[in-house]
Image: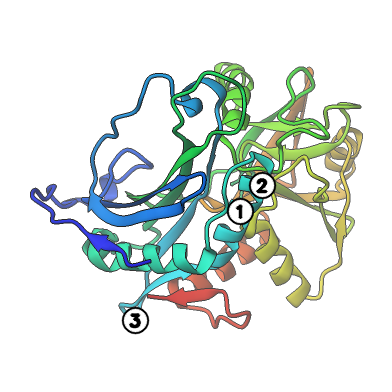
């Protein structure tokens, strides 16, 4: 399939002050899109000016949430080159989400080619200051204008780009986490492993209550026993416990994070032992009090690693370590961002240059 490039009639003003960049509200001039129809497959791939869509009010995504997405970043490196981090992993995960949500798969190599072409055209939107990047959001929505409940026969796939500021502008501030035993994010047999909008819609209530109580994030427990750690906010979570790194296993209820995967690799490189098992709330509380739990951090594309300062469960709050970012957490952050920005050797072949 050849990608058509439609002319750009108007250019948005470029970012003047990169320190003012936030997350996810500013978009570049162009986007990639293509459509799918049952019997015809994917067609009409094109790069077009960024613009609102016109959708039928009956279309399936608006009623039954048949939607999936991805999140990755393009980095402007020290050597001036533009790089992506493990982009094929994102498109392969996109296809796993598609299968769960009864949506058509895309060809990962074609999606990557389309993304690279879009990035070539939008390269001057990639910010230059330390810690900034261009956030990439591939998305698929069901567009069939039909109210019957069944997988849609038509889909739209698109990629939009958003310049984002440095996540840690004022230095690292460890987050305060609320452990929720009232709300759950996902259930065995549910859609927790798919990157689908509905999981996020369902999580808003708990986040809102956590924010109102003065917490930064919600820690999700397993839906069955409400005892074991799953994820935190929209990040995977790791603990440094008795000198080992413990992280929840991939059993279908949590996202298979690409940052999680990469961090686990770096931990192995350091010679530390990893246990993929669900830590219990009791182990967090006892571990923090006895000092056996030294560090805790979330992992995800947006923050890379996010150090945890405190956990609160019911009326009990415990501090992790001295409440500051731990040594291992800091080292992992420096190494992974170093690989992304070209300051640390990419020994695993994770970086894909434009
Ligand atoms: C996207 C996401 C993650 C992190 O995945 P990365 O590939 O590391 O960005 C973790 N949990 C949830 C629920 C997510 O949606």
**Above/below status of 36 relative to 354:** above
> First in sequence: mark 2 or mark 3?
3
The reply to whether residue 70 is in sight is yes
Q: Few, some or many C-alpha atoms within 10 Å of disc 3 (few <14, some 14-19, many ≥20)?
A: few
Q: Which residue is rendered at x = 53% and y = 50% of the image?
A: 303
Is the residue indicated by label 3 positioned so its CB lies within 8 Å of ligand 1? Answer: no
Q: Which mark is residue 95?
A: 1
Is the residue indicated by label 1 positioned so its CB lies within 8 Å of ligand 1? Answer: no
Q: Few, some or many C-alpha atoms within 10 Å of disc 2 (few <14, some 14-19, many ≥20)?
A: few
The quadrant in which the C terminus is found is bottom left
The Cα atoms of the two marked residues, 1 and 3, are separated by: 33 Å
Q: Which mark is residue 79?
A: 3
Outermost residue toward the front in this view: 39
**Above/below status of 185 relative to 243:** above
Pointers 1 and 3 in contact (CB under 8 A)?
Answer: no
**Above/below status of 264 relative to 93:** below
Q: Few, some or many C-alpha atoms within 10 Å of disc 1 (few <14, some 14-19, many ≥20)?
A: many
Q: Position of residue 317 (x, y in %)?
A: 75, 27
Question: What residue did someone put label 2 on?
Answer: 99
The Cα atoms of the two marked residues, 2 and 1, are separated by: 6 Å
Pointers 2 and 1 in contact (CB under 8 A)?
Answer: yes
Under circle 2, the secondary element is: helix
Under circle 3, the secondary element is: loop
Q: Position of residue 320 (x, y in %)?
A: 74, 43
> First in sequence: mark 1 or mark 3?
3
The quadrant in which the N terminus is found is bottom left
């Amino acid at each position: 399939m050849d990608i058509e490039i439609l002319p750009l009639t108007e250019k948005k003003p470029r970012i003047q002050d990169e320190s003012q960049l936030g997350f996810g509200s500013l978009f570049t001039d162009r986007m990639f899109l293509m459509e799918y129809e049952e019997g015809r497959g994917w067609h009409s791939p094109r790069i077009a000016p960024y613009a609102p869509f016109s959708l039928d009010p009956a279309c399936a995504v608006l009623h039954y949430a048949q939607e999936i997405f991805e999140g990755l970043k393009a980095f402007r490196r020290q050597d001036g080159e533009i790089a992506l981090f493990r982009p094929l992993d994102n498109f392969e995960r996109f296809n796993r989400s598609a299968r769960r949500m009864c949506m058509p798969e895309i060809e990962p190599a074609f999606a990557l080619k389309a993304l690279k072409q879009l990035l070539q055209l939008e390269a001057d939107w990639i910010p230059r200051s330390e810690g900034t990047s261009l956030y990439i959001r591939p998305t698929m929505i069901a567009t069939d204008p039909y109210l019957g409940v069944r997988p849609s026969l038509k889909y739209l796939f698109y990629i939009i780009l958003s310049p984002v500021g440095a996540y840690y502008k004022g230095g690292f501030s460890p987050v305060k986490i609320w452990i929720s035993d009232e709300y759950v994010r996902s259930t065995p047999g549910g859609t927790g492993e798919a990157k689908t909008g509905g999981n996020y819609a369902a999580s808003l209530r708990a986040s809102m209550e956590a924010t109102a109580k003065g917490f930064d994030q919600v820690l999700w427990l397993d839906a069955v026993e409400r005892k074991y750690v799953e994820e935190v906010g929209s990040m995977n979570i790791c603990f440094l416990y008795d000198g080992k790194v413990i992280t929840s296993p991939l059993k279908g209820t949590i996202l298979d994070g690409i940052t999680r995967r990469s961090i686990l690799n770096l931990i192995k490189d350091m010679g530390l032992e990893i246990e993929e098992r669900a830590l219990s709330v009791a182990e967090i509380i006892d571990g923090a009090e006895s000092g056996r739990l030294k560090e805790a951090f979330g992992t995800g594309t947006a923050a890379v690693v996010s150090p945890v300062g405190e956990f609160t469960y019911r009326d009990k709050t415990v501090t992790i370590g001295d409440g500051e970012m731990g040594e291992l957490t800091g080292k992992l952050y420096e190494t992974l961002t170093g690989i992304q920005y070209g300051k640390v050797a990419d020994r695993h072949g994770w970086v894909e240059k434009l």
